[in-house]
Image: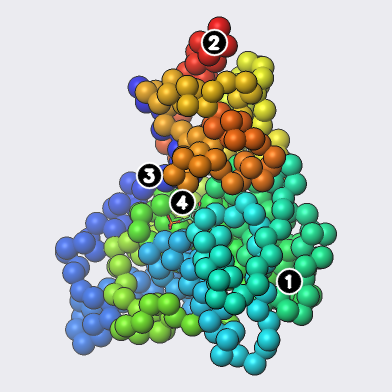
Amino acid sequence: MLAYLDHQASTPCDPAVLAAMAPWWSEHPANASSRGHRPGLEAAAAVERARAQVAAALGARAEWVVFTSGATEANNLALKGTAEAALAGASGRRRLVSLVSEHQAVLDPLHYLERHGFPLSLLPVGGDGRLDPDALAAVLGDDVLLVSVMAANNEIGVLQPLAAVAAQCRAHGALLHVDAAQAAGHLPLAMATLGIDLLSLSGHKCGGPKGVGALLLRPGLELAPQLHGGGQEGGRRAGSVAVPLVVGLGEALTLATARQEAEARRLAALRDRLWAALEALGGIVLNGPPPGQERLAHNLNITVLGVDGAALHQRLRRRLAVSSGSACSQGSPSHVLAALGRSRPEAAASIRFGLGATTTAAEIELAITVVSEALAELRR
Ligand SMILES: *Cc1c(COP(=O)(O)O)cnc(C)c1O
């Protein structure tokens, strides 16, 4: 048996999501932009239903939703689109602010913009991965165009204090972008209530298909499109809308939202069992806040002290699908673990367990056995 515990890299499509998508692959082939015939109008109606589902799950309005190919594209559109629009606007705000521990799909567009004349401030995080609101306050000024802070970290599951961040941004007239790829569908996230201006999400992190996502943006925001073409999505993202994928995304978020509370409770219990057993092995430290505090219920990230990371992961590989502290960026150590103060060898000897909808107690027991056996061997 191989236990799949890498749900934060990608989590399977729910069967109900597959069923919702099924007719839209071939039975209903029309392009949602073909308004001249009934099949086209039906496809357009399916897209609009999905748009309403996505909006409802995020406490937003349907008109705010722009469908994209995923969170990477949504982040690029949010950041580059806002920056480019600012060049044409009246305000002189140019500075971009974010965290060192953001996903590469935020950091890379920000570094790109930095090379194109937008000063960038990357704030450090504390030992538990949380942003210090005082550090944000220190950089916020009337030159700040946009602040980008993720809702939940993909590696260590830490939740950022979004309400406090949003209040600070509002007070200084800066826009707030939130990469919510790991949070959407997993925890309550009401965009309007929190005061988030732009929010990115991804289908395959919440039980939907790969290759689809969305950018939600509050009305009145200037956004320069990054894909030019057929004028779809209100001119904000050209390209034929991927009808089956979008239908799947809408269904996935509706299901995930309905199950959210019960599922978080179930996965937190499994995660707590895993951590209790691993902690008892000794010489293992947790990355991110302790379970029960500001972290995702379905994430556990640990560093095994004093063992070789490659040897450790080689022993896990056959029976556990997990992430290491180096898998994410072509073998270089995780920038998130480095931000917490972990050394290169410590990062390599780290394990991310991502639990999900299909995770069973038997898989957790297997994970405990496999890690225990690996450590016994390595420490012999
Ligand atoms: C997965 C992920 C992304 C990228 O999403 P895609 O839809 O795969 O492009 C961006 N940000 C975070 C936090 C993620 O976890």
Camera-side residue of 291 and 313 = 313
- Foreground mark, 1 or 2, reads 2
Asked if disc 2 and disc 3 are in contact, CB closer than 8 Å, the reply is no
- From mark 4 to mark 2, how far is it between C-alphas? 36 Å
Q: Which element carries disc 4, helix, strand or loop? A: loop
- Residue hosting label 3: 12
Rendering coords of residue 37 (x, y %): 19, 84
Q: Image quarter for residue 60?
A: bottom right
4 up-or-down from 105: above or below:
above
Rendering coords of residue 140 (x, y %): 77, 71
Of the numbered discs in the image, which one, if any, rests on residue 169? Answer: 1
- Residue hosting label 4: 206
Q: Which element carries disc 2, helix, strand or loop? A: helix
**First reached walking from the N terminus: tag 2 or tag 3:** 3
| Mark 4, other Cα within 10 Å: few <14 / some 14–19 / many ≥20 | many
- Residue hosting label 2: 376
Q: Image quarter for residue 290?
A: top right
